[in-house]
Every structure is written in structure tokens, then in C-alpha cells.
Amino acid sequence: MAKVLLERIGSAVENFMDPQEYEKNLEYMQKVNSSYTEKREEVKAGWGEEYVARVHKKGKMTTWERIDALKDPGSKVYPIGTFVNYGLEFGSGKSKRKAPGAGVVTAFIKIEGRYAVVIANDNTVASGSWWPLTPEKIERAQEIALKMRIPVVYLIDCSGLYLPEQAKTFPGGIGAGHIFKMNSLLSAEQVPQIAGVFGDCIAGGGYMPIISDIVYMTEQAYMVIAGAALVKGGKSQHITSLTIGGPDVHVHLSNCADYRTPDDRTLLLKIREEMAKLPSPALEYYRFGMDPAPPLFNPAEIEGIFPIDYRVTYEVRQVIARLVDNSLFWEFFPGKGKEIVCGIGRVNGLYTGFIANNQVLSDHPLHKDAKRPGGILYQAGIAKMTTFARACDSDGIPLVWLQDVGGFDIGPEAENMGLLGYGSNLIYGNSTISIPVITILLRKASGAGYYAMFGRPYDPIVQLSTPLTRLAVMEGRTLAIGTYRTKLDDDFNIISTGQEEHDSIKKGMEEVERRITNDMDPILSARQLDTDEIVFLGELRPYLETMIEMSYHSTGYRRIKNPRIWSMHDINVLYGDR
């Protein structure tokens, strides 16, 4: 009977690293993490205590208070899109304002033992208005829910578009109106949607809850196509938004809402009751008799494994050993394409595929005694990734890509071996795959290698970055050389007719290198939604636990084979190397 036999991988830190180097790396990462923690808290604070007080004065809870009350006691919140719009200011002159998190919180939470995607307007930021990239952030959360078939909970407290910036949010293919299309697609695919309306719900905000299966309103909530001020101006009617769109109207007359509750806390309790009615997760069934277990080696140790200098290598199997249950792993074709590690482990008892770049030097297959650098995509490694990913797709196993890639191999040998063709084969597989895929940019994510290893353009369920991530076409120095290649000799020395020209070229190259290096700041890609979240290295295991459990959450929506009939068994027997 075919079966994957997981084997112990990894070892204690002192067995593969100089303890002083480990402590030095750890101290560096703790400083970096501290900086990001401050930024997270800055976003979470919204517009600050003054606006928190305003919310409380109205008898309402803040958005984060609602989320904390909604989730299961003791469970964690896993945000995505924290840094959207981070550091940007909108408007001009004295009216310039920031939009922390684009004025909306999107996160994975557990309610009554069931995962949900929560989408909640931040009512401390311009009364929950929609800013530039707010619609795209909401739609990204809806897209994740649609792919995973995970319930969506809307906590709506939204005064509509932030009108001074409406030109950046109203039009466009994925502007504000696309939110309602996503509402419709979720409904069409029978993904549960539950909406709670807590206050303002104007214009687009008013449309947002309507397609939900169940809509609750508090006594001070209202839903209107246009607020009272606009109605007064357009029709000279002296009314309030509550009288034209409150629960008296929408629960009892229009039937646009289902139930009314006296306050925020009661509404949240009702959402919990609705979630409890949904089918329970299928996790125990798909564990096939295996209990969840932590890695044998502490996941927090990953913080010290990564070198401070991104050019220094590390052993990726030591990272995987701190992500999988009991540090047990079955490696696929370990003797071929050694620059890539592919294999199966368990995360919280659930089978999970992993594909990772191996940074250490490996033997050159054509030149005896020659070595090749890791983190580069070569023929055998590309073929191994393609075969393994297709096997995971056939067998229904969620797949995690651990990227630290410098790109494809280049030069005459690469072209002769047909890397363009092998890369196209991998890209085709990535483009047509149906299983849940999670991409993690551990460190370098460069050039076409980033695309080939299931980067964001290939629609992973979630793409996570770390504080070490360097996402770009190429490193700054390399790009500077390419930019000034006509001014350099074969050894990349500057060719000039005099000192002034030499200094000008040197200054230009340094400026290009500096600008590209700054562009690789993870905050930049997170700010513009090029990645979903920046996660600390020590948080990778908890985030993976959440994502993998969500991948197995529902029954009957995708193929999940039992381990006895996995296609990768046959592939390994026929073509394996051990």
C-alpha cells in the first residue's frame, strides 16, 4: 500500500550554526520586528484617542473592540492588508489626512470554532469612509473568502466614499462598484455572508450589506442611498438619515434588513449565533487519524537562522523543520534539482506540500567538481517543482511556496537546456492549478523567479512577506550595472574620458542602486497591495496553521484524496532517486 513516510528533519541550532552568529541574527531581527510592531500599532490606532472617544460618546464600540468581542475567546486575529496606504497623505494643505489601513480592517478570525473573513470599516478614520485602495482591500478579502469558501462577516459603519478622493475610488475596473460584484459572486457560490450594520451606511456602504444572507441593524444604524444632507439639498426635505433608513424602515417596511438589535454587543452575539448554525469544519476528518502537533524545534528560532546579510546562505530544511508538525517531512526527489526542496509535511495534523529554494551550493550536473549557487532556478529544479505542484493539485494537497529566489539561470548553457520552455511549463501549471496556494516571500523575490514560484500575479490565496523580503526585478547594484552598461567595461569598471565624467557615472549608478534598494522595502509593496501582509519570521507557523486549516475547512467543494491514492507515490516509485 502506497503511503508517504514522514522522516525527521532539522536539528538543534547549536548543531548547524555558530551560537554567537545565531544570537547576533536574533538581536537584529528583534530590532526590526520592534520597528514593525510600532507601525502595526500606529495603524491599529486609526486617527487616535480623540476619535475613539467620539465613537464611545455615540454609545458605539470601536472596530477593533467589535472584532475582539466577535472572535472566540483566547483565539487570535490574523490581519491582512495592515499596511495598505501606510505613510501616504491625501488632500492638500491643512486638509491633508492619512488613511491608516485604508480605513478598513480585513482579517481571519475564528467564530464558534469556524473561520471567517471579517471586513470591518474603521469607524475612527473618517467615520469608516472609503479611501483610495479601500475598495481593492475589501475585494481582496472577498476574493480570499470566495476561493476558500469561508464565510464573510461584514461589520459596517461606513459614511461612503471619502469624497475629496472620489476620483481614485469611484471609477475603474476594481473600484468601489466591484465590491458589489464580489458580494454577488460570493452569493452565487453559496459562500455565507453575514452583515452587521452599526451606524452610518451611506451610498456604496448602503449597498454592501444588502446581498448578504442575513442583515442585522442596531437601533442607531441606518442604510441609505443618499444621506439626509443630500436629500435636504436635492429635495428640500427636512429629515434625518435615521428616519429615512433606520431599522423602522428596513426591518419592518422595505425588508432590506432582517433583524434589529439594541446595541453593538447584542448584534455581535447574534452574528456568533448565526455562525454556530453553519456546518462544522472538516478538519478532524482530513487529519486521517493524526493529532495536531507543534514542530519539534521552536518556530521562533527561525528569527535567528536568517543571516543579517541577504547574500549569505542558510539551510532551508532547518526552516521547514520549524514549520511542520513534529519536524517530520517526506522529501520528493531529494537527489535531483538540489537547489529546490519539495516535499510533504503536516501543519496542525493536515497534509501540506512545500516548495522552497535551497540556498546552499549544489553540484553542477554537467561539470564534475563544479558547484552552482543556490537560490537560482535551473532545469532539474524547475522540472521538479512543476511535477510536484501538479501532483499536489491532482491529490488535493494545499501548497506552500517558500521563496528566496534570485531568478532563472542565464547564459548559453541555460538557453541550450531550454529554460524558457521549462519555465513556461511551470507557469502553465501555476496558472491552471486549483488547490489552495500560499506564497511566502522569505527573503529575495527577484525577476521571473518571483513569477515562476507563484508570486502574487498568479493568484495565490495569500502572499505573505517578511521584514527581510526584497521584491524587485533585480538587486540595486545589478540594475545599476544594467542601466549604465554602455559606460562600463567587461569587468564593470567605469569607462570615462576624465574625472568629471567618471564621478558623474559613479554618482548616477549609486543613485540608481539606492533608489532600487529603497523600492524593495516590504512596506512599499504592502502599501500598494502587491503583497497581502508583512509577517514576522516567528509568526509564520501560526499564520500557516490558520491558512491550512482554512484550506481544509469546507467539505465537498474540492478534491482531497486520502493518502493511499496520491499520484506522487507512483511518480516517486517510477522516477525517484532513492
Image (cartoon, rainbow, N blue to C red):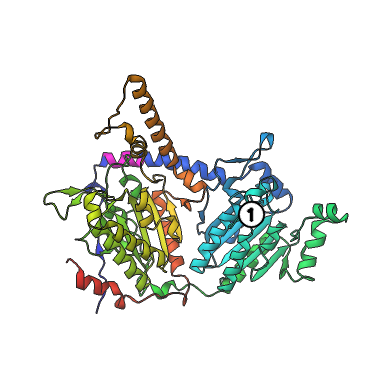
Q: Position of residue 389 (x, y in %)?
A: 33, 65
The N terminus: image quadrant = bottom left
Using the image, determine if residue 309 lies above or below residue 275. Answer: above
- Image side of residue 172 versus residue 410, left or right: right
* Main SS category, magenta section: helix
Residue 327 visible in the snapshot: no
Residue with the most extreme top position: 499
Residue at 21 percent across and 52 percent down: it is 413
Using the rendered view, name the quadrant where residue 96 is placed. Answer: top right
- What amino acid does circle 1 point to? Pro
- Image side of residue 65 versus residue 315, left or right: right
Q: Nearer the viewer, residue 152 or 93?
A: 93
Q: Is residue 22 magenta?
A: yes
Q: Nearer the viewer, residue 515 or 209?
A: 515
The C terminus: image quadrant = bottom left
Residue interval drawn in magenta: 20-26
Q: Position of residue 412 (x, y in %)?
A: 22, 50
Q: Identify residue for label 1.
A: 171
- Image side of residue 242 versus residue 443, left or right: right
Using the rendered view, name the quadrant where residue 430 is placed. Answer: bottom left
Q: Nearer the viewer, residue 499 or 233?
A: 499
Using the image, determine if residue 460 lies above or below residue 126. Answer: below
Residue 463 visible in the snapshot: yes
Mark 1 closeness class: few <14, some 14–19, many ≥20 residues within 10 Å: few
